[in-house]
Amino acid sequence: MTYDLIIRGARVVTGAEVVECDIGIREGRINALGQDLGPADEVIDATGLIALPGGIDSHVHIAQPSGPGIEMADDFASATRSAACGGNTTVMPFCLPEDGVTLRQAVNDYHAKADGQCHVDVSFHLIIKDTDAQTLGQDLPALFAAGYTSFKVFMTYAGLALSDREILDVMDVAKAHKAMVMVHAENEDAIEFLRDKAEASGNTGPVHHARTRPIPVEREATHRAISLAEIAGVPLTIVHVSNGAALEEITRARRRGLKVFAETCPQYITLTADDLDRAGFEGAKYVCSPPPRDSAEQAAIWAGLEQGDFDLFSSDHCPFRFADSAGKDAQGARATFRNIPNGIPGVETRLPILFSEGVMKGRITLPRFAAITATNHARLYGLAARKGAICVGADADIALWDPNLTKPIRQTDLHHGSDYTPWEGFEVTGWPVRTLLRGQTVAKDGEIVGAATGDYLSRSAPEFLI
Ligand code: DUC
Ligand code: ZN
Ligand code: ZN
């Protein structure tokens, strides 16, 4: 039998093992793992490289409505170019309905933005901001059946935050349809109280974004979200966990037997609130929610990563341009942090940062890296078997990594639509040098290759709910 492609000689990360073997690919799928496979139409000599499952970034925001006059820096073309160059083969953005638009219409509009534009595969989570009968009784069930099997609810942001009762009603629908609930856990009333006080005292610079969202704001909401999920009888994922106290709520719930999954992001192991205190308006570049904390909390997050408390490591890519009145320099943003758009770019740097700081520094193993950057994302969001692992039968979504390549992160090397990276100058050892999507090279040596061949992925229920 002739393969379309053989990747020869890499150290291949297959589930719990790392083995030196060939990967035989036919018709876009992994057909064989073994020694001396052949013949093939094409051979990639990957000696000295590491073959990892293509990254799945299950938490990104692309072309999401962001309020009057504000524009996200990425469309689907630029975000997925950036994703591919960063070693990813699937991204999962959120579909947010604008006011007065039904969830179904929002999904249709979002597809129109993505169709034909994507350099990696994509699949949409839904954001539930309306809990009317049409949304919960009709739109959501129909969308679940059509393969949109996860959605996010917010406990913060005026206009987006749901009450506890609303969250319970949404969870009840999730239970009936075996969908995954993702929660943004921060207490809106507490933030509003602290924000009003800060502004009244003239504390209006970017660092006060972090100071008005202290750890108890997140810890309390995490505890409440878990309690609501326990009452409703559903599993849930707490996204972007930033600190040890919130993580403790999760590990405690798990010890009681609850199915609570935890996600963290590069900003919580590498940035601190001091970054929001940089001179002038520079701190705005680091405004995201929850905010980066301090070095003690970074250590707590690392401990969670090392001990296996985190299931998911995502970017929360939410890009705005810095020198732009439609971005971080929005109207009123210099007058008060309240008006600074929330979010930072990171889809291209997520994997290199964790590889360098985690794998190369001996904190996590390669199989653990694969689990929290790809495999678990596929399992928790209904893509298992096809995505997230190098195994026979799966799509040939593979990133080849050079563990000896050292270079700093530079905005000039990145492909996102933002005009800065929060990690400018951050030294990284270990970079993805080639990304293959269903056996086709989509990025090589930091540049995109070929046309936009990404597909839309309809999903099953999360693995543990089937
Ligand atoms: N939450 C996110 O998940 N992303 C960006 C902003 C936010 O609050
Ligand atoms: Zn969030
Ligand atoms: Zn997010």
Image (cartoon, rainbow, N blue to C red):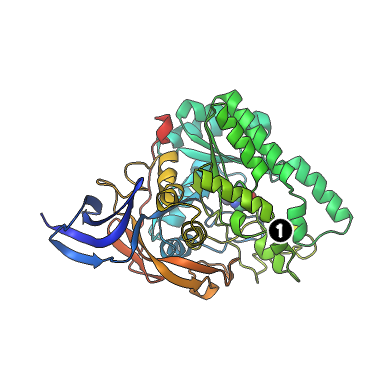
* Depth order, front residue of 142/376: 376
Secondary structure state at the residue bearing disc 1: helix
Whether residue 209 is visible here, answered yes or no, is: yes
Instruction: Please tell me whether residue 359 is drawn above or below residue 309 in the rendered image.
Output: below
* Residue 347 left/right relative to 287: left
Residue found at the very far right of the displayed protein: 201
Please, is residue 46 above or below residue 111 in the view?
below
Q: Which of these two is toward me, 95 or 60?
A: 60
From where the camera sits, is residue 160 visible? no
Q: Name the residue under label 1.
A: 273
Q: How crowded is mark 1: few (under 14 residues within 10 Å), some or many (20 or more)?
A: many
In the rendering, at what x and y percent does residue 197 appear? 86, 50
Which sits in the foreground, 175 or 138? 175
Position of 153 relative to 64 (above/below): above
Residue at 50% in and 31% down? 138
Q: In the shown orientation, is residue 199 left or right of residue 260?
A: right
Point out the residue furthest to the front here: 362
The extreme bottom residue here reads 412
User: Residue 294: x percent and y percent?
Assistant: 69, 55
Q: Determine if the C-beta at disc 1 is less than 8 A from ligand 1.
A: no
Residue type at mark 1: give it: Ala
Q: Position of residue 274 (x, y in %)?
A: 72, 62
Name the quadrant containing residue 166: top right
Lateral position of residue 97 relative to residue 224, left or right: left
Image quarter of the N terminus: bottom left
